[in-house]
Image (tube, coloured by chain):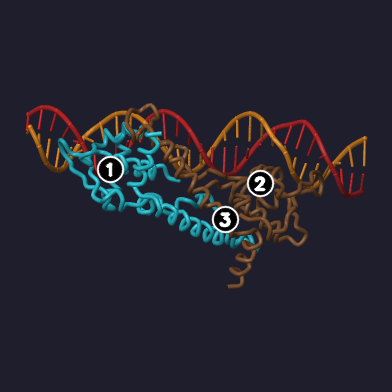
Chain colours: A brown, B cyan, C orange, D red
DNA sequence: AACAACTGTAATTGATATTATTACAGTAAT
DNA sequence: ATTACTGTAATAATATCAATTACAGTTGTT
């Protein structure tokens, strides 16, 4: 799994947790434990997909543009990491004269597409809001 | 996803396809398109998990030790790549005094455990035998 | 107008993970 | 003995991932 997906989810949850719903890339980066440039790259992608609004300039930063309970991890997954399940490495060779070697790449690809859908439907059941609930539940314990 | 999982599945399917159910690491490697050492490492793991028998020495190689229709991709996944879904990169910091930053790693981990189970149950529905059927179906088309 | 605090993005470097290669000891058939 | 294999460690080559540096553009503040 793509680690940008993790950063994206973490960032959205953090925004949802903020009373004013806002944070700068530096604040997010320090909370996530990475550098602001990486955060900005991820947030830029989230903006393009309508998850957050951006305000440049002094006092700017990011703000959630949807209800936390309306955003599922599947939405985020589709935006950030869709298809990332299949390994880049590819098995077999289409030019092979063996039944197995020549068709494995295609069949394997189909298997991973199915796996990706399965994953997506699992992520459908988790929202940014429910992630926040889990966090508070964990903190209470 | 681990590419060794792909090599393992490919190798098992190839063995299932062979009339005598046998192949050497070199034959497998050329079919998979990788080098024999890598194949032997993967096969060594499959042997330890009871999927294949090994015969060393001249004329040796690997042979399936279970019925192709009895071996699911979930079995292979558990042996080769269990837990590989979660990215190695970890978000947040347990020492943080923020609710979100300090508990995110745990919650994220739980999410990925669930995803892993979901994946596993999907792989449960695919066997080495059914992979072979898909290949022949594809070749016929 | 000048400054400070931001985002957006490209380019570079450094770290880490993945894959291929080389080498060689051990085993079994001929 | 020789040949054809597996098992495994060590090394080298390559690709991927993450952090850093640099700087242009935007906006609020004084």
- In the displayed structure image, the side of residue A120 where residue C30 appears, left or right: left
Label 3 lies in what chain? A
Image quadrant for the C terminus of chain A?
A: bottom right
Q: Name the residue under label 3.
A: A123
Q: Distance between the residues labelled 3 and 1?
A: 35 Å
Q: Residues within 10 Å of mark 3 (few under 14, many from 20)?
A: many
Residue occupying the point 44% across, 53% down: B122
Q: Pick whichever of labels 2 and 3 is earlier in the sequence.
A: 2
Proximity of marks 3 and 1: CB atoms separated by less than 8 Å: no
Q: Mark 2 points at which residue?
A: A39
Residue occupying the point 49% across, 59% down: B113
Which mark is drawn over residue B16? 1
- In the displayed structure image, the side of residue A7 where residue B28 appears, left or right: left
Mark 2 or mark 1, which is nearer to you? 1
Q: Which residue lies furthest to the bottom in this view?
A: A141
Image position of A94 with respect to B94: above or below: above
Mark 3 or mark 1, which is nearer to you? 1
- In the displayed structure image, the side of residue B80 where residue A110 appears, left or right: right
Image position of A24 with respect to A41: above or below: below
Q: Where is residue A73 in the image (x, y as percent from the top left)?
A: 61, 54
Q: Position of residue C28 (x, y in %)?
A: 11, 41
User: What kind of element bears circle 3?
Assistant: helix
Q: Place residue B8 in its image quadrant.
A: top left
- In the displayed structure image, the side of residue B108 where residue D8 appears, left or right: left
Mark 2 or mark 3, which is nearer to you? 3
Q: How far apart are marks 2 and 1 (CA)?
A: 48 Å
Q: Residue furthest front?
A: B141
Label 1 lies in what chain? B
User: What kind of element bears circle 1?
Assistant: helix
Tell me whether marks 3 and 1 sit on the same chain: no
Tell me whether marks 2 and 1 sit on the same chain: no
């Amino acid at each position: 799994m793509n680690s940008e997906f993790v950063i994206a989810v973490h960032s959205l949850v953090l925004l949802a947790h903020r009373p004013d719903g806002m944070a700068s890339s530096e604040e997010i980066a320090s909370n996530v434990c990475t550098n602001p440039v990486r955060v900005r790259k991820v947030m830029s992608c989230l903006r393009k997909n309508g998850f957050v609004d951006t305000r440049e300039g002094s006092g700017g930063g990011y703000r959630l543009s949807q209800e936390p309970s309306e955003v599922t991890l599947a939405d985020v997954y589709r935006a950030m990491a869709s298809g990332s399940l299949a390994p880049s490495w590819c098995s077999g060779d289409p030019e092979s004269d063996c039944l197995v070697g020549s068709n494995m790449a295609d069949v394997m690809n189909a298997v991973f597409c199915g796996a990706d859908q399965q994953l997506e439907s699992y992520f459908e059941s988790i929202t940014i809001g429910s992630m926040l609930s889990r966090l508070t539940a964990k903190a209470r314990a």
